[in-house]
């Protein structure tokens, strides 16, 4: 029942915020980003109020000065709401087809997110890198989900070449991010669970490494920490939801 109430309130609240915030499409980007952060905080607060799911942020001291590249695990829609609420000026890399959705897509363009056409691999990478260079000049946090889609906790990692191309091209620090959101907002399920979603910013990987070393360090950092956070989350989930 709590999950149903959360989902219903999430969609109704999001629709209201979207409609009331539509004038922001015609203002400054910074105003629209403030609206995006507000929506993120709404989702996090609503989830805590109805489900009892809290958030714990670890390792923010590992975030260097902007611009930076953030490579994050992606287990649930939660990440797309949380990052705007806890990061100053995020530019998420997202599927271009999402840009065609009324209001959602319009705002994504207003936020100056970075679209990628996944069906046009070589051309898509060039376009993504070009857009990312512009966001770098704006001194923003460029966020990529290296596996390109949501994955279940414990699933075999499948990191795509996009994150390596970004790392090489941008020549800025890359901050790996581990989390356990999939434990409390599981993929393919309508149920949400009480507990604490932990998101942890890990020590940055300096620019200039060879691609093989970078990929190994990135995967090792994210997957090792995600395994730890998953165990921590599962223990709490069993304790609070049994």
Image (tube, rainbow, N blue to C red):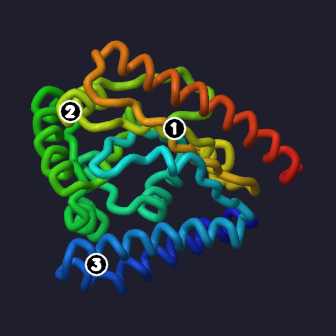
Of the image marks 2 and 3, the number of the one nearer the N terminus:
3
Asked where in the image residue 206 lies, by quadrant, the reply is: top left
The N terminus - image quarter: bottom right
Of the image marks 1 and 2, the number of the one nearer the N terminus:
2
Residue found at x 17% / y 31%? 169
Determine whether, in the image, residue 59 is placed left or right of residue 205. right
Name the mark on residue 119.
2
Find residue 177 and report its horizontal and vertical position in percent.
49, 40
Which label lies toward us, 2 or 3? 3
Determine whether, in the image, residue 99 is placed left or right of residue 160. left
Which is nearer the eye, 76 or 89? 89
Residue on which the image places disc 3: 31
Residue found at x 60% / y 49%? 58
Residue 35 lies, with reference to residue 152, above or below; the image says below
Find residue 138 and report its horizontal and vertical position in percent.
18, 57
Determine whether, in the image, residue 98 is placed left or right of residue 197. left
Find residue 182 and report its horizontal and vertical position in percent.
61, 43
Residue on which the image places disc 1: 202
Q: Answer few, some or many: residues within 10 Å of disc 2's Cα (few below 14, many 20 plus, some between 14 and 19).
A: few
Determine whether, in the image, residue 166 is placed left or right of residue 17. left
Q: Answer few, some or many: residues within 10 Å of disc 1's Cα (few below 14, many 20 plus, some between 14 and 19).
A: many
Q: Secondary structure at mark 1?
A: loop
Q: Secondary structure at mark 3?
A: helix
Cβ–Cβ below 8 Å for labels 3 and 1? no
Residue 133 lies, with reference to residue 224, above or below; the image says below
């Amino acid at each position: 029942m709590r999950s149903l109430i959360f989902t219903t309130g999430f969609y109704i609240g999001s629709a209201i915020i979207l409609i009331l915030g539509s004038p922001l499409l015609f203002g400054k980007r910074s105003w629209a980003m403030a609206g995006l952060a507000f929506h993120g905080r709404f989702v996090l607060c609503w989830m805590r109020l109805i489900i009892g799911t809290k958030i714990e942020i670890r390792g923010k001291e590992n975030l260097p000065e902007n611009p930076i590249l953030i490579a994050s695990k992606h287990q649930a829609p939660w990440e797309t709401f949380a990052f705007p609420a806890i990061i100053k000026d995020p530019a998420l890399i997202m599927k271009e087809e999402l840009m065609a959705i009324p209001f959602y897509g319009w705002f994504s363009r207003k936020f100056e997110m970075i679209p990628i056409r996944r069906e046009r691999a070589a051309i898509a990478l060039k376009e993504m890198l070009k857009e990312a260079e512009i966001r770098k000049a704006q001194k923003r946090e460029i966020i990529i989900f290296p596996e390109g889609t949501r994955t279940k906790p414990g699933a075999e990692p499948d990191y795509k070449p996009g994150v390596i191309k970004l790392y090489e091209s941008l020549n800025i620090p890359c901050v790996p991010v581990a989390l356990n959101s999939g434990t409390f907002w599981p993929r393919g399920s309508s149920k949400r669970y009480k507990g604490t979603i932990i998101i942890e910013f890990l020590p940055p990987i300096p620019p200039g490494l060879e691609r093989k070393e970078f990929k190994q360090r990135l995967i090792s950092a994210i997957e090792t920490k995600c395994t730890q956070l998953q165990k921590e989350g599962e223990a709490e989930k069993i304790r609070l939801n049994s």
